[in-house]
Amino acid sequence: MTSAPQSQPAPTRPTSRDVARAAGVSQATVSLVLGDKWRGRVSEATAERVRHAAHELGYQPNLAARSLRLGRTRTALLVVPALTNEFFARVYTGAAAVAAEHGFGVVLYPSPEGTGPARDPFASARASLDGVIASSMAAGALDVLRGAGLPLVMLDSDPADTGVAARVNLDIADGMRQVAEHLLALGHRRFVHLASAVDTWTFAVRARALHDTLGAVPGTSVRTVPAPLDVQAGREGAEHALGCSGPRPTAIVCDDDILAAGACKAARRLGLRVPDDLSVTGFDDLALATAVEPELTTVQLPAEQVGERGMAALLAVLDGRPAEPGSLPVHLVARGSSAPPSADGLRS
């Protein structure tokens, strides 16, 4: 009769004491380093030695115990106007990457009313979250979450909004100035601004920068046509603008790439060639910008970096540190949808 095989004891998980012994430091130092609170208390070399020892041992901190000890859930809420826009998906990717490095999770929450008032997605935000990051929302739309007493980090939002723990903005105005200067340098003087009908800070900044830049050059004209943010609305708005009486515009400046795709469709339906008869520019540099033909001249926004900076700002606030200041730069990507106006276009 054969005896049953002896079960093997489960391998023991390395502890912070094991990491401390391997790195030649105290457990308190391990806690500081792995809790990302070592700056100013521990040298960079010591911190690196602790991280290396933890990696070699396969050490994983007990996040549940740490949360109870610190009174934190290690969870952040990212509020966005919609899930269908690629920009917000990239913001989430950046925020989640930084969060993971610090043992945090990010819950993505699309506001049910778009940029309008957001509802508390949990029975009690205070009990479920450590903080809120909001992208391209008005601060007033988050009153129910701010009422929970959570730190709020705003992304791509009005600097005049108060009650915000930290803010991460893009240099949106400079992006639209780059578009206007690019088209002016090509020789365009008659413009249509295909503007987003969404009333938010970021689109107001785009409109102001465009009109200020074009208005400073004698002989220019610009007409604004508002449209909802979808391809069909962009096409209808552009068709209306191009079909009006008077000299035809030689360039359409769009508030985002989706509207620009609609403008390109409108041009084709009216028998106009892009960019020979009409230049079209976008904003955001979504994947769509290189999917259309000709590819869109647009402004590239570092969406993932926005998310990274936003999560880093929330972590700084939670640790009592100042968030990194300054706006993130953006830059124009000139592609095939913009060119000098044709001689016929200048005369028409």
Image (cartoon, rainbow, N blue to C red):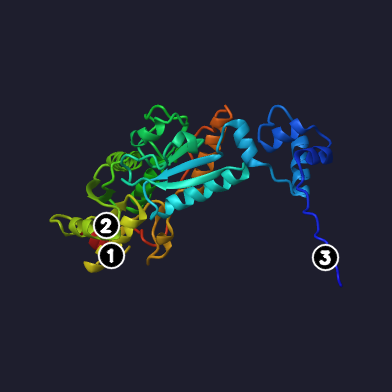
- At label 2, counting other C-alpha atoms closer than 10 Å, the crowd grade (few under 14, some 14-19, many 20 or more) is many
Dot 3 or dot 2, earlier in sequence: 3
Between 328 and 106, the one lying in front of the other is 106
The residue pinned by badge 1 equals: 265
Amino acid at pointer 2: Gly
Q: Where is residue 90 in the image (x, y as percent from the top left)?
A: 48, 52
Where 80 sits versus 85, above or below?
above
Name the side, left or right, on which 232 lies relative to 328: left
| Image quarter in which the C terminus is found | bottom left
| Image quarter in which the N terminus is found | bottom right
Name the side, left or right, on which 92 lies relative to 216: right
Amino acid at pointer 3: Pro
Between 95 and 45, the one lying in front of the other is 95
Dot 1 or dot 2, earlier in sequence: 2
Q: Position of residue 236 (x, y in %)?
A: 21, 59
Disc number for residue 234: 2
The residue pinned by badge 3 equals: 5
Kindly report which numbered mark, 1 or 3, lies closer to the viewer in this rendering.
3
Tell whether label 2 touches label 1 (CB within 8 Å). Answer: yes
Q: Which residue is drawn at 55% across and 45% down?
A: 105
